[in-house]
Amino acid sequence: MKTIKPGSSSLPRFIGKILTGVLLGLTGWAILAQTPGQNAPAPDLDKIQIHTLHVNRNVYMLVPDLGGPNMTVQIGDEGVLVVDTMTEPLVPKIMAEIRKLSSLPIRFIVNTSVDPDHTLGNVALVASGIRSPQPRPVGTPGLAMIIAHENVNRRMVSPEAGIPAVRADGWPDDAYFGERRDFSFNGEPVQIFHQPKAHTDGDSIVHFRVSDAISAGEIFLTTGYPRIDVSRGGTIQGELDALNTIIDITVTGDMQEGGTLVIPGRGRLCDEADVDEYRNMVTIVRDRIASLKKKGMTQEQVKAERPTRDYDRRYGSSTGAWTTDRFVEAVYETLNMDPGAPK
């Protein structure tokens, strides 16, 4: 697949429409359940193709068709860094796209969450014969280093029942604690920010400062409502805090277009205005549900009121691993769990 290169920073929405309509399709990956206990038919991975979009400078976006999770690739003289790894059967196609960008070894893998369709490619990418010129500080010398928050590592070591497990050689060997992890690679600072209680309790945002690009993981989507995984520590207020963190980092370009580009967990390439619009939608829905709950309505009564109705055409779904009803349930359940949430 030919690499798509946007000609200027003013094109993300135009390119996004092309990607959304042509590459991503309408079906979405019901894959490898995003939430524990959620069973959904697996896609035919043989039919999925990977497409490459140049984001800015050193950073590229790998987009699977059929609506799967995106992957970020940073290249340079020191090698290759990837953010999230999709799933093992897709690794040969992923490597074919990476090899069009660089012949150098994969040095770093960052997992933004523990979701199987973000992590099940870890082992195959590490073991694909792509070796680092420097040894890992922990584990097998010479292989790519896997970085993730400690909560991701903890959940990989003790996976939930029914969720595909990552083998031990695909677990993080640099599990960071606290609010951030940063390092320099390929001539630019790479900053990883932990976002607690968002999609899960282990989410990370990855900021490439020179390339002026952010890999947002499942915190930000253009294909549906936020996937708040309550069983793994996700909350509505944590989700909003994480979206506000992205907005705080981004800088707009001319006429509020372009500037810092944001790679969502799923969907098209975006800029700050897109994240701001999404954050506003989530805030409005949260406040509506909070108001209904304050009136004493049960969860079922709130769902019957359809507090998302004016956004459902764009973000809603009645089928698949994450439905509109499940989003409303997650908001209702987690409304009062965090300081700052409406009472």
Image: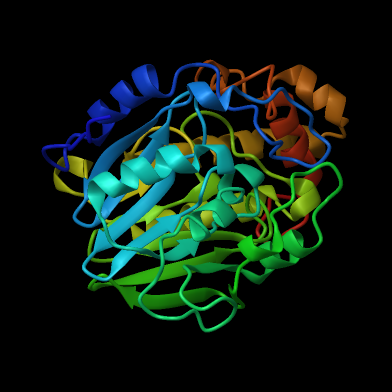
Taking the image as shown, residue 190 lies to the left or right of residue 143, namely left
Q: Residue at the spot x=65%, y=27% of the render?
A: 30
Which x, y percent locates residue 303? Answer: 77, 23
Which x, y percent locates residue 260? Answer: 27, 52
Q: Residue at the spot x=78%, y=34% of the render?
A: 329
Q: Is residue 276 visible?
A: no
Which x, y percent locates residue 75? Answer: 27, 59
Q: Is residue 25 visible?
A: yes
Report how many numbered discs are placed on residues in the image. Answer: 0
Taking the image as shown, residue 308 lies to the left or right of residue 33, namely left
Along the line of sight, the residue nearer the viewer: 286 or 44: 44
Taking the image as shown, residue 284 lies to the left or right of residue 54, namely right
Along the line of sight, the residue nearer the viewer: 98 or 234: 98
Q: Is residue 299 above or below residue 262?
A: above
Q: Which quadrant holds the N terminus? A: top left
Along the line of sight, the residue nearer the viewer: 181 or 46: 46
Which x, y percent locates residue 213? Answer: 31, 55
Q: Residue at the spot x=49%, y=67% of the render?
A: 193
